[in-house]
Amino acid sequence: MNIIEVRNVTKVYNKKNPFVALKNVSLNVKKGEFLTIVGPSGSGKTTLLNIIGGIDADYDGMNKIKGINYHELSDKELASKRREDVSFIFQSFHLMPSLTVEENICLSAKIKKYKVNRFELNDVLSQFGLMEKRKSFIDELSRGQQQRVAIARSLLSRTDIILADEPTGNLDSKNAQLVFDILKSLTREKQKTVIFITHNMELAKQSDRIVQIRDGVLYET
């Protein structure tokens, strides 16, 4: 079953001096699939991710998530569906330095008004190797640990889709592999759907499928 269906999406920046970031892009992603998007900087990878995740609503074409065409929703409906369906993981983590590890992990669930019980939190902390760091603040963690906190936060938000925009870009090879393995395990064990952007072809080759974007055009590889 396709959980994501993108059809003929075109994105143009600056209508006066137009730059076409995406050109008639179509893409299907199945539930529980780990899809990697590769391509040079400025090719349109992040733009596509933002459209799929409902951050960018200014485009032509169809973006259907779990059977709902996001492009037909009002701003209020889109914000609600985005919170329900999609979690983002960024290269820069977006963690709150004033909160502890466990408070950061529970933050998205709290915003979305999900109640996280102690058993569920302990399970996630253990799975991500963060149990001993649960009361630590973010500046007391390594970059690899911080990225694990960001992934754990997206997991507790209970969304079916995780969009990861170069989450390993600032990590060494060991931590990059660890983060990739954690995300990959979510597709196997919890049927999460992951779209992963990377420049690291060694990681990309371990995904279920790779697509490439060059100059706004998507190619299956």
Image: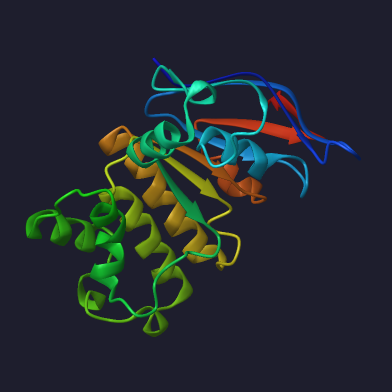
Q: Is residue 205 visible?
A: yes
Q: Residue at x 39, y 72 (%)?
A: 96
Looking at the image, the residue that sits furthest to the bottom is: 140
Q: Position of residue 2 (x, y in %)?
A: 44, 17
> How many marks are shown on the rendered structure?
0
Which of the image's four quarters has the N terminus? top left
Which of the image's four quarters has the C terminus? top right
Q: Is residue 130 visible?
A: no
Q: Position of residue 168 (x, y in %)?
A: 55, 59
Q: Nearer the viewer, residue 1 or 14?
A: 14
Q: Position of residue 110 (x, y in %)?
A: 24, 56
In the picture provided, is 215 more to the left or to the right than 163? right
In the rendered image, the vertical position of residue 4 relative to residue 134, given as above or below: above
Say which quarter of the image contains residue 116. Answer: bottom left
In the picture provided, is 15 more to the left or to the right than 36? right
Looking at the image, the residue that sits furthest to the right is: 17
In the picture provided, is 89 more to the left or to the right than 138? right
Say which quarter of the image contains residue 148. Answer: bottom left
Q: Position of residue 166 (x, y in %)?
A: 58, 53
In the rendered image, the vertical position of residue 28 relative to residue 136, given as above or below: above
In the rendered image, the vertical position of residue 70 relative to residue 97, given as above or below: above
Q: Residue at x 36, y 42 (%)?
A: 83
Q: Residue at x 25, y 60 (%)?
A: 106
Q: Residue at x 64, y 44 (%)?
A: 46
Q: Nearer the viewer, residue 1 or 88?
A: 88
